[in-house]
């Protein structure tokens, strides 16, 4: 088995940076669409880490887990966007501070 041209730690550094950007977006933003995009960035960072470890160890387990994470992310995006659109139609805003009450 020949060594990989790009070492594992470079993939993990990129994954940690993506996860940090996503976390900052979730914690700092008040726009629901930006928060949904930040969660997607965090899920992509986790996928990158799974695929990097699968590549390093030479098995397919990381690919299988990544497939399921992508499926969950697609469902989360569809349901989250539907909820945001429904709330926008009612409240006329996607600001998370205004979405704290489901009444009215």
Image (tube, rainbow, N blue to C red):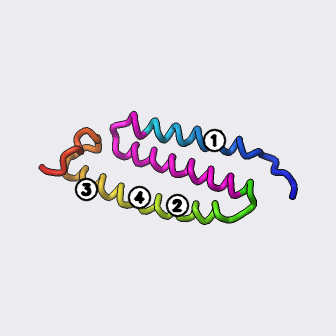
> Mark 2 or mark 3, which has the lower sequence index?
2
Q: Check disc 3 and report the residue beneath it.
A: 86
Task: State if disc 1 and disc 3 touch (CB < 8 Å).
Answer: no
Percent of width and height locating residue 28: 39, 34
Tag 3 secondary structure: helix
| Residue 14: mark | 1
Mark 3 vs mark 4, CA separation in Å:
15 Å
Q: Residues within 10 Å of mark 1 (few under 14, many from 20)?
A: some
Q: Earlier in the sequence, mark 2 or mark 1?
A: 1
At 34% from the left and 40% from the top, the residue drawn is: 31
Helix, strand or loop at label 2? It is: helix
Q: Position of residue 53 (x, y in %)?
A: 68, 53
Q: Which residue is mark 4?
A: 76
Camera-near label (3 vs 1) is: 1
Dot 3 or dot 1: first in sequence order is 1
User: Is mark 4 in CB contact (under 8 Å) with mark 1?
Assistant: no
């Amino acid at each position: 088995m020949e060594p990989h041209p790009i070492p594992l730690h470079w993939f993990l550094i990129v994954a940690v940076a993506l996860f940090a950007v996503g976390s900052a977006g979730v914690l700092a933003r008040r726009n629901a669409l930006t928060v949904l995009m930040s969660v997607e960035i965090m899920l992509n960072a986790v996928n990158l880490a799974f695929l990097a470890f699968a590549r390093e160890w030479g098995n397919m387990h990381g690919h299988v887990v990544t497939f399921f994470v992508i499926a969950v992310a697609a469902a989360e995006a569809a349901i989250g966007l539907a909820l945001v659109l429904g709330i926008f139609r009612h409240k006329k805003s996607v600001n998370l501070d205004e979405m704290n009450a489901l009444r009215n």
